[in-house]
Amino acid sequence: MKEAIIMAGIEGHPRTGWIEVICGPMFSGKTEELIRRLKRAQIAKQKVAIFKPKLDNRYDATKIVSHSHSEIHSIVIEKPAEILHHAIFAQVIGIDEAQFFSNDLIDIVTRLASAGKRVIIAGLDKDYRSTPFEPIPQLLAEAEYITKTLAICMRCGAPANFTQRLTPSKDRVLIGATDIYEARCRHCYEAPVNEEEK
Ligand code: ADP
Ligand code: MG
Ligand code: ZN
C-alpha cells in the first residue's frame, strides 16, 4: 500500500512521538500558543513543518498568523493525507485550524505520533452553536497533552469559552474575525435561534 511505504520512510524515534492539542473559542490565543511552541522547537534546531487548511483564507496563504499578528511560515493543504508527504523529515508538526479538516486527520496524526513525531494541533473545540467541532473532540481523546485556552468576554470581561456569531448566517463554516465573531462567557453567550432548522 502506497501510504505504508511512505510511513516506512518517515524519519523518527518511535518512542518519542506524541500529540498535543490546543483548543478553545476564537480569540483565545490558540494560534499564538501554537506559534510559540513551534518557534521554540525551531530555536532548538528541530525540523518543523506547519500546515493549515486551504479553507482558512483570512491571511496570507503561506503563513499562519494570529489575531495578535505573530506569524510563521506554513504549507497550505486540502486533505490531511498531504501531511504525510510534506512531513517525512520533520520532527515537529504543527497544524492550525484543525476543525476545518475531515476526520481523516485523526488517523494521520495518530500514525505520525506513532512514527516518532511531536504533533501539535490547534483548533476550535466548538462551533458557534457551542456544538463539538469534529475532529477536535476525537483528537482530544488521542492526545497526550491538552491545553484549553480561553478568551475574554467582550460583554463582561469574564473568561470566555464561547464564540458568539454576530450575523444570522447558519453555515457552520463562515470565515471572519471580529467583524462576525465575538468571544463570550457562559452567561453572556446567546445561543442562535431557529435551532429546529439544524
Ligand atoms: P485564536 O487562534 O484562538 O483565534 P489568536 O492566537 O489568533 O487566537 O489571537 C489571540 C489574540 O486575539 C490575543 O492576543 C488578542 O490580541 C486578540 N483578541 C481579540 N479579541 C480578544 C478577546 N475577546 N479576548 C482575548 N484576546 C482577544
Ligand atoms: Mg487561530
Ligand atoms: Zn460575559
Image (cartoon, helix red, strand yellow):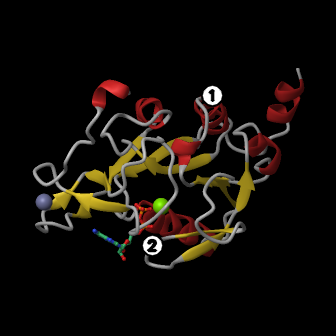
Q: Residue 67 has which mark?
A: 2
Asked where in the image residue 177 lies, by quadrant, the reply is bottom left
Q: Which residue is mark 1?
A: 107
Within-10-Å neighbours for mark 1: few <14, some 14–19, many 20+: few
- Quarter where residue 188 is shown: bottom left
Q: Please state the horizontal and vertical placement of residue 14, each as a whole percent of the image.
A: 65, 36
Residue 143: image location, x then y, percent: 45, 37
Label 2 C-beta lies within 8 Å of the nearest ligand 1 atom: yes
Res 162 label: none
Instruction: Give the x, y percent position of residue 111.
Output: 66, 31
Please name the residue shown 67% across and 70% down the image: 45
**Residue shown at 51% from the left, 78% from the top:** 70
**Quarter of the displayed picture in which ligand 1 can be seen:** bottom left
Q: Quadrant of residue 43?
A: bottom right
Q: Name which residue type carries label 1.
A: Asp
Label 2 – label 1 distance at C-alpha: 30 Å
Label 2 packing within 10 angstroms: few (<14), some (14-19), many (20+): some
Compared across the picture, whether 162 is left or right of 3 comes to left
Q: What residue type is disc 2 on?
A: His
